[in-house]
């Protein structure tokens, strides 16, 4: 994101269906719908089949705009299905959705605390799960170091990249977020991608997007599928460039203060990271989480980092926890953890929800 469709989650990660190369649909073995009722939302407007007829007024420009639209969507859902409101409610997502998730969750917690809500009853929010979340962009922009340490670029190339990264850091620190975003695009497109030959930062083992990501996209564009979904002639945006453009000033801003406030409420928070992600890398994420200022910050910093193994001794990942806050690094997975490690992602989310 921003502007990536949640249809990717349904058909490529943890939804009930998988689409094959010949566009046949099969059930996913480790779908999260096997254990939970799931609601997937294309957010912000312009992602997926969601649309606005007013440009630029209808598009989100900042987190406040995004939050307003997302909260209104939840309001409408629970008006249509009021029986669902009594259920425990969890909010989950990955990558750029980390910003939406933390902001929405904090709003719900504050409304419950103050007894103010547009919903007749407060949502029964129990927890938040964020996968490879873009929570603090400055923690991940050291691509020169990441790519050099993995042998994907040379020393001279890394030095060139570092100069640009220093400029980017200065822009962010001076709150010139839109310029910082432009510089970041240059550093990735004309720097890292050109030096390494990669065209994706999601998984070190996959220099380019996997072709199987196109299967479900082709399926959703079939005329009979579009008719069944009642989407008419709407354009399907899996990653909307328009949404991306309007949110360029938001991309480089941190959600640190929001996450810190959220952690002080009595809800469970899980941050998990696939350790093969080249941008939202585990080292940067863990260092960022260790810098958070909240009630049990010191307890989290000193918490034991445990090995997560299966019964045969195979290492699944690593975990640490303090009170209501857990951080898990999952091995052999990139940014799309439920796709890369479906069984262990399913086990993880079940254990999180079921304590």
Image (cartoon, helix red, strand yellow):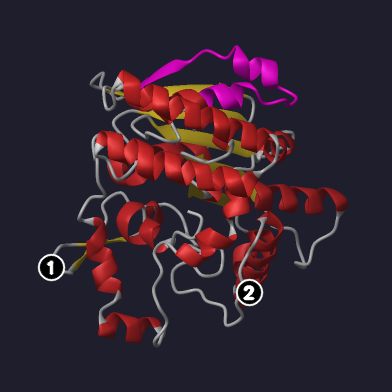
Element class at badge 2: loop
Q: Earlier in the sequence, mark 2 or mark 1?
A: 1
Q: Residue at x 30, y 49 (%)?
A: 30
Cα distance in 3D space between marks 2 and 1: 37 Å
Q: Which residue is mark 1?
A: 22
Residue farthest toward the left in the current orientation of the protein: 22
Q: Residue at x 41, y 52 (%)?
A: 35
Q: Residue at x 44, y 69 (%)?
A: 48
Residue 103: image location, x then y, percent: 67, 49
Mark 2 against mark 1, which lies toward the viewer? Answer: 2
Tell me if label 2 and label 1 are in contact, CB under 8 Å. Answer: no
The correct choice, above or below, for 56 with respect to 318 in the image is below
- What is the crowding at mark 1: few (fewer than 14 residues within 10 Å), some, or many (at least 20)? few
Check residue 91 for magenta coloring.
no
Residue 72: image location, x then y, percent: 67, 69
Between residues 259 and 296, which one lies in front from this camera angle?
259
Residue 152: image location, x then y, percent: 27, 27
Q: Which residue is mark 2?
A: 58
Can residue 138 be seen here? The reply is no
Residue 322: image location, x then y, percent: 61, 22
Res 121 quadrant in image: bottom right
């Amino acid at each position: 994101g921003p502007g990536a469709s949640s249809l990717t989650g349904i058909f490529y990660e943890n939804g009930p269906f998988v689409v094959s190369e010949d566009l046949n649909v099969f059930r996913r073995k480790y779908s999260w719908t096997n254990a939970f009722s799931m609601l997937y939302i294309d957010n912000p407007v312009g992602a997926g089949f969601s649309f606005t007829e007013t440009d630029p007024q209808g598009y989100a420009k900042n987190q406040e705009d995004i939050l307003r639209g997302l909260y209104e969507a939840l309001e409408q859902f629970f008006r249509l299905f009021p029986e669902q409101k009594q259920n425990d409610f969890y909010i989950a997502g990955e990558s750029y959705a980390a910003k939406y998730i933390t902001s929405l969750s904090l709003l719900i917690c504050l409304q419950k605390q103050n007894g103010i809500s547009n919903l007749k009853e407060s949502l029964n929010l129990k927890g938040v799960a964020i996968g490879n979340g873009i929570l603090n962009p400055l923690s991940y922009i050291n691509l020169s170091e990441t790519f050099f340490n993995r042998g994907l670029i040379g020393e001279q190339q890394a030095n060139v990249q570092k100069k640009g990264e220093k400029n980017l850091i200065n822009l962010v620190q001076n709150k010139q977020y839109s310029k910082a975003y432009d510089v970041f695009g240059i550093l990735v497109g004309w720097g890292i991608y050109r030096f390494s030959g990669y065209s994706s930062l999601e998984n070190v083992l996959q220099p380019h997007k996997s072709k199987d990501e196109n299967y479900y996209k082709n399926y959703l564009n079939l005329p009979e599928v579009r008719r069944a979904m009642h989407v008419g002639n709407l354009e399907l945006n899996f990653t909307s460039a328009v949404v991306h453009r309007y949110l360029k000033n938001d991309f480089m801003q941190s959600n640190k203060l929001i996450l810190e406030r959220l952690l002080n409420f009595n809800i469970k928070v899980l941050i998990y990271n696939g350790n093969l992600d080249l941008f939202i890398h585990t080292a940067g994420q863990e260092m960022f989480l260790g810098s958070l200022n909240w009630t049990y910050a010191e307890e989290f910093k000193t918490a034991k980092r445990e090995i997560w193994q299966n019964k045969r001794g195979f290492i699944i990942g690593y975990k640490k926890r303090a009170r209501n806050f857990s951080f898990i690094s999952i091995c052999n997975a990139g940014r799309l953890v439920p796709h890369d490690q479906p069984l262990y992602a399913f086990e993880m989310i079940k254990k999180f929800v079921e304590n």
